[in-house]
Amino acid sequence: QVQLVESGGGLVQAGGSLRLSCAASGRTFSRYAMGWFRQAPGKEREFVASISMSGVYTSSADSVKGRFTISNNNIQRTVYLQMDSLKPEDTAVYYCALETFKNVVRNPDYWGQGTQVSVSS
């Protein structure tokens, strides 16, 4: 099994920044991708960003391009999401995810418990 533990959520004003972290522990894999999804109240969970274990492959949703940056430390099996120029519509619960034997997270095998990000106008 794999455990994913997120940290770094909180309340920020529009235009501000937050940095989310997610640390993986437990079973290891020769190849995997980690990433972030989010779910706003009354909406479906949506993909935000993804990064391969090597850090070579990254992917992000159009809605966050140019504002959010995903990075990782594959030695510590940690993924980060730097969120700048935050907007009220970024308000959601952010979930860390891991998919095994892939370079991009699309159908996660493991999920974190979620961390709340709230952006006030």
Image (tube, rainbow, N blue to C red):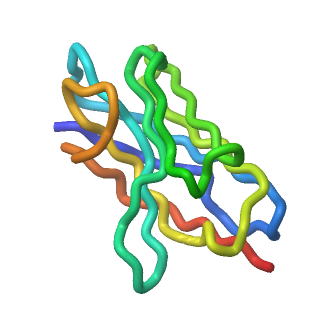
In this view, the residue farthest toward the bottom is 42
- Of residues 90 and 3, the one nearer the viewer is 90
Which x, y percent locates residue 47? 41, 54
> Residue at the location (70% across, 48% down)?
67
The tally of labels here is 0
In the image, is residue 40 above or below residue 64? below
The quadrant of the picture occupied by the N terminus is top left
Left or right, 85 with reference to 115: right
> Residue at the location (38% across, 20% down)?
53
Left or right, 91 with reference to 97: right
- Of residues 79 and 104, the one nearer the viewer is 104
> Residue at the location (21% across, 20% down)?
29
Which x, y percent locates residue 33? 34, 30
The quadrant of the picture occupied by the C terminus is bottom right
Left or right, 108 with reference to 75: left
Which x, y percent locates residue 68? 65, 45
Asked which quadrant contains residue 120, the reply is bottom right
